[in-house]
Image (cartoon, rainbow, N blue to C red):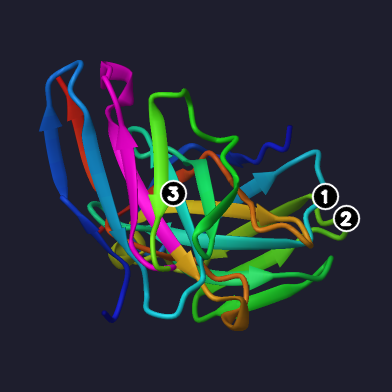
């Protein structure tokens, strides 16, 4: 696609349920990032993928959070046993080493945990 | 821990006024990016600065990277309602993939 896409755009879930968020990066971009943004604040780094591997998972808030990337393309962020404090906008970005440091962001998934 | 503090946090001004947004850290960064984010969308890159003291201009926007590469500023001349949005700075360190994002400045320009 022309840009980074994320689905769903909005997700409302009940506390304790699992959710899966999807990111489809720009074709050919080897690097993929997940961030969390609360209430229009700055971005909190969650995890980075280079290809299918994640050399840095240190930003994941707890072991309820996990992410994977397959085929060097699509990535999914899974939150198990959701809590109300997980409510936020989850943003995905991709970049290409050949293209320099610019990250191209998707529109985000707004997660609301009731 | 690297932190980027932005000031002011909120800014509401009239169309035609000038403004400056600051991005400060105690850490040195090899590059500094500025993004603008509009409601319901992801951030969009405005500029990347990499050299201490560097100044870049993008129409009415002027970006400066501090000499010590610890701080940056964004100056907007004659602000317009279309400049409304959340401005984010992000610092990068050479040899790493990780960018540290600032706390954000929410700008509203009134017509």
Subunit of label 1? B
Question: In the figure, residue B58 lies in which quadrant?
Answer: bottom right
Tell me the element at label 1: loop
Q: Is residue B73 above or below residue A44?
A: below
In the image, which residues are magenta?
A72-93
**Do discs 2 and 3 belong to a common subunit?**
no
Q: Are marks 1 and 2 in contact (CB under 8 Å)?
A: yes
Going 32% across and 33% down the picture, which residue do you hit?
A39
Q: Which mark is residue B68?
A: 2
The answer to whether any part of residue B42 appears in the image is yes
Residue that appears at 65% across and 58% down: B97
Mark 2 → mark 3, Cα distance in angstroms: 29 Å
Residue designated by label 1: B28
| Image quadrant containing the C terminus of chain B | bottom left
Callout 3: chain: A
Q: Which residue is mark 3?
A: A34
């Amino acid at each position: 696609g022309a840009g980074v896409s994320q689905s769903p755009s909005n997700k409302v879930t009940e506390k304790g349920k699992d959710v899966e968020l999807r990111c489809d990066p720009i074709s050919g971009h080897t690097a993929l990032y997940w961030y969390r943004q609360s209430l229009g604040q700055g971005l909190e780094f969650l995890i980075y993928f280079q290809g299918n591997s994640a050399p840095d998972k240190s930003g994941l808030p707890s072991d309820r959070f996990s992410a994977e990337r397959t085929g060097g393309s699509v990535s999914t962020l899974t939150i198990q046993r959701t809590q109300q404090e997980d409510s936020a906008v989850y943003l995905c970005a991709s970049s290409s080493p050949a293209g320099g440091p610019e990250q191209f962001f998707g529109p985000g998934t707004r997660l609301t945990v009731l | 821990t690297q932190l980027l503090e932005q000031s002011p946090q909120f800014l509401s001004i009239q169309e035609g006024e000038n403004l400056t947004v600051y991005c400060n850290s105690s850490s040195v960064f090899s590059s500094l990016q500025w993004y603008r984010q509009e409601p319901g969308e992801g951030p969009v890159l405005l500029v990347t600065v990499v050299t201490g003291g560097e100044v870049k201009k993008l129409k009415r926007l002027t970006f400066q990277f501090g000499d010590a590469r610890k701080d940056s500023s964004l100056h907007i001349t004659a602000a317009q309602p279309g400049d409304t949005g959340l401005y984010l700075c992000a610092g990068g360190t050479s040899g790493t993939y990780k960018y540290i994002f600032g706390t954000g400045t929410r700008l509203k320009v009134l017509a």
